[in-house]
Image (tube, rainbow, N blue to C red):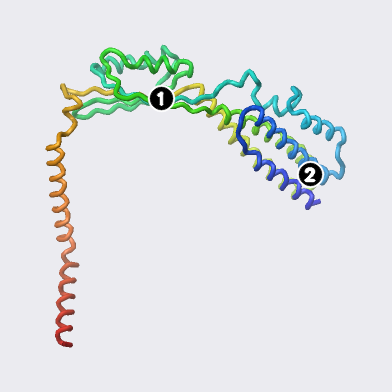
Amino acid sequence: MKLSMSYAISIAVIVLSCNNGSGYEQASNKKAAVGLEAETSAVTDKKTALTGTVDDENDLTNADTVANPATPSSDVFQSGSPALTDWDKKIIKTANITLELKDYSTYNASLHARAKVFGAYVAQENQTETDDRITNVVSIKVPVDKFDELVNSFAGENTKLVEKNIATEDVTGEVVDTRARLAAKKQVRDRYLELLKQAKNMNEILQVQSEINTIQEDIESASGRVNYLVHASAYSTINLTYYQFKNGVTQKDIEPSFFTSLAKAFGRGLTFISDFILFIVSIWPLVIAIFIALFYFKRLKLKKA
């Protein structure tokens, strides 16, 4: 009985590890059905090992479920695989925008109000100030359907667009595939829970519980991934950087000229030489020891000659 149980558990683990494909709804559903069929067979074998019999009625029900995975009565596709109405694109959008301003205070004060108009919110903000400029770096989360409108609203009067780039990532296939695998794993977990009730000794309980714990970890990981992707695709990210030069300073003023760069390079060379001299001086005992060793070595060499 222990051998049968171990064999059944091994089959279940192998089938779970093989269920890692990616694709769209039809391919994901097919893989989920195949995985569930193998898992059902493994759990049935284990049930036989525990009880010595197989419930014919339950077997027929499981067989019908696997043979008709696309029917509305299938638990796999009701609970985990998205319906056609949910088969919308999941696209993660990210924009990086840099602006040079003439009136930093006014623009900064109106930013939060501007975000609210589009149903967005400021997720992170970091303001810095130096001798020549004041800068603010803001991360904004905006509903995907308002993304383009908000992006186009930043540039305007008294602003200069320095940089703008937009990146998109289509995660539709990953969401559908992960949901299908999540549904299959939940079905397998439920069948192991049924087996746990039929365990006859502590060894059987520990083996089945170990498999349940492993499957539960996979379920939580897959569920978390789906939630992240759905939220990331529902709310796009805009990384906005805007700054203003102070006291009439311009970009040309802070960019060093050739002669300024040459002077700085010369200064760095002098700094290197001075640092090297200081290093030699700091290790003077070692230098003296080396000279003494060389002196005695030459004297010994002359005596031998």
**Residue 213 appears in the picture as rendered:** no
Q: Where does residue 177 sit, x and y in percent of width and height?
A: 62, 31
**Residue 252 appears in the picture as rendered:** yes
192 sits to left or right of 251? right
Residue at which label 2 appears: 46
Vertical arrangement, residue 87 with respect to residue 219, above or below: above
Give the alpha-carbon distance from disc 2 to disc 1, as whole Å: 53 Å
Residue at which label 1 appears: 166
Quadrant where the C terminus lies?
A: bottom left
Q: Where does residue 207 sit, x and y in percent of width and height?
A: 72, 47
Q: Where does residue 83 sit, x and y in percent of width and height?
A: 66, 21
Q: Where does residue 50 sit, x and y in percent of width and height?
A: 82, 45
Vertical arrangement, residue 117 with respect to residue 252, above or below: above
Please report contact status of discs 2 and 1: CB closer than 8 Å, yes or no.
no
Tell me the SS state at disc 2.
helix
98 or 211: nearer the eye?
Answer: 98
